Amino acid sequence: MMKYLQSIGRSLMLPVAVLPAAAILMGIGYWIDPSGWGSGSAAAAFFIKAGSSIIDNIPILFAVGIALGMSKGRDGAAALSGLVAYLVITTLLSTNTVALLQGIDAANVDPAFGKIQNAFIGILSGIAASVMFNRFSHVQLPAALAFFSGKRIVPILTSALMILVSAVFYFVWPFVYTGLVSFGETISTMGALGAGIYGFLNKLLIPIGLHHAINSVFWFDVAGINDIGNYWAGTGVKGITGMYQAGYYPIMMFGLPAAGLAMYHTANTKKKKQVASLMLAGGFASFFTGVTEPIEFAFMFAAPLLYGIHAVLTGISMAVASLFHWTAGFGFSAGLVDFLLSSRLPMANHPYMLMLQGLVFFAIYYVVFRFLIVKLNLKTPGREDDEASDPDGTETKAVNKNDKFAAMASEIYAGLGGQENVTSIDNCVTRLRVEVKDSSSVDQGKIKATGVPGVVVTGRNSIQVVIGTQVQFVADEIKKIHAS
């Protein structure tokens, strides 16, 4: 079950990665016309509407992206089926259709059906389509129906399945929606404390890849909060809208880079150069783009205490920003790019105070991390025991060849057990996700010797190798090796 949920989280990263495009387009538009929101400039209106075309259709992106990401071979037929699934259920359960079925006026229909076009339904549609594709894409029909064999039958069967799902949701959805709204409202009514609880839970769920689930409740229109959509559309309340985003800026732009600096300063002298390259790359990714996994996975499992403190500090940062009504949103994550684009938006409220808050958290992270690493002798990067599998450093040197990704891929593949052990290779934004016959046959020392931030064993047959934002290049090379 956990493996399946992680697969959903991984697949969500494909559509989520589209959001920076919306952030850039809308940010440019608002920068041109920050007060008129496009009414005073045709160029601004052009950019804003182009960006909103993405933001307003996030559920469709989820349906297509998840169906594609969870299908065998990532086939386009699965993506089409995801779209079909979404269109069927959202049309059958739309306010007008429900009014027709119930024989009442549309104004009297349960408001839950007015919110059927949401991220939750998009995710459900993507999952349903991927299941149908993986089960029926190789079915052969009799000669008279041969045209519909294989992949062509998947959208048809998916639409039939979603008719049944729609029938169930006709009765269930009002209760599900009410539950989601109640959860979101319970947290949202807690004000700054609620924002802090959300930030804390978000970080605790990252190790198992389920943080996207809680994010969807607060960031998108699952429970009526829609913090990202309302922020960029300028339809919220100034100083309130963005409260589930703003507190991440001090953590991602300042806190985590400071943690990286502390880990570098406390590393063993002979390993400082290697740790410096890792922390510099991870710190830059966190500061500039808001991608935090390269640094977080560097100490998440090596020093769980530090990660727990990181989760607490994230919650505190979210609560502080919310308490003082300092708001800034993002389209992708809380990095410098999104800060510059969002700080001129109508919903931004004293956004530069988040930078001052960030300086405070830089000092807190550095002092706390350095003190605990030294005091408790925590095995953060550069302080771990030498790996027996690489006594003379030959594996580490391999990544210095001209084709560093090919060389790194070769070493990682060998550490995974090669052709005899590896059964499938996939990746998300920062992690290589590998299915193996036996995880005990994996040589973690050999893999870590390539300089990767971490190796995570998620099950007897599942391994995650944290690479960073360049994971796609390594994954492509490993797939080439595996296929040869």
Image (tube, rainbow, N blue to C red):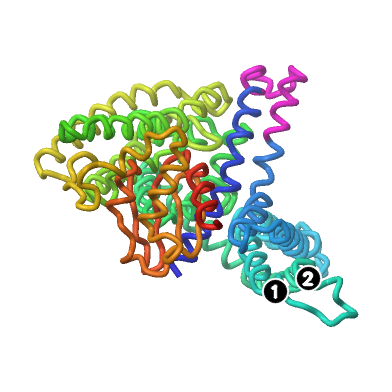
Q: Residue furthest bottom?
A: 142
Q: Residue at x 66, y 62 (%)?
A: 125
The crowd level at tag 1 (other Cα within 10 Å; few <14, some 14-19, many 20+) is: some
Q: Residue at x 24, y 52 (%)?
A: 389
* Callout 1 secondary element: helix
Q: Residue at x 33, y 48 (%)?
A: 454
Q: Which residue bears the numbered disc 1?
A: 136
Indicate the position of residue 80 as horizontal and vertical percent values.
74, 58
Residue 145 falls in which quadrant of the image?
A: bottom right
Say which of 268 and 224 sits in front.
Answer: 268
* Callout 2 secondary element: helix
Q: Which residue bears the numbered disc 2?
A: 153
Is residue 148 found inside the magenta-colored segment of the image?
no
Amino acid found under the numbered disc labelled 1: Phe
Q: Tell me where the magenta segment starts and ends, as one range.
A: 29-51
Indicate the position of residue 8 as horizontal and vertical percent values.
53, 59
Q: Of label 1 and label 2, which has the lower sequence position?
A: 1
Amino acid found under the numbered disc labelled 2: Ile
Whether label 1 touches label 2, CB < 8 Å: yes
Is residue 34 found inside the magenta-colored segment of the image?
yes
* Quadrant of image for the C terminus: bottom right
Indicate the position of residue 46 as horizontal and vertical percent values.
75, 26
Say which of 183 and 359 sits in front.
Answer: 359
Q: Is residue 7 above or below residue 44?
A: below
Indicate the position of residue 298 as horizontal and vertical percent values.
30, 43
Kindly report the distance in space between the C-alpha atoms of the residues bearing marks 1 and 2.
8 Å
Relative side of 313 to 341, left or right: left
Q: Residue furthest left?
A: 375
Say which of 207 and 481 sits in front.
Answer: 481
Judged by its main secondary structure, the magenta piece is: helix
| Count of numbered badges drawn on the protein | 2
Q: Would you say residue 108 is visible in this rendering?
A: no
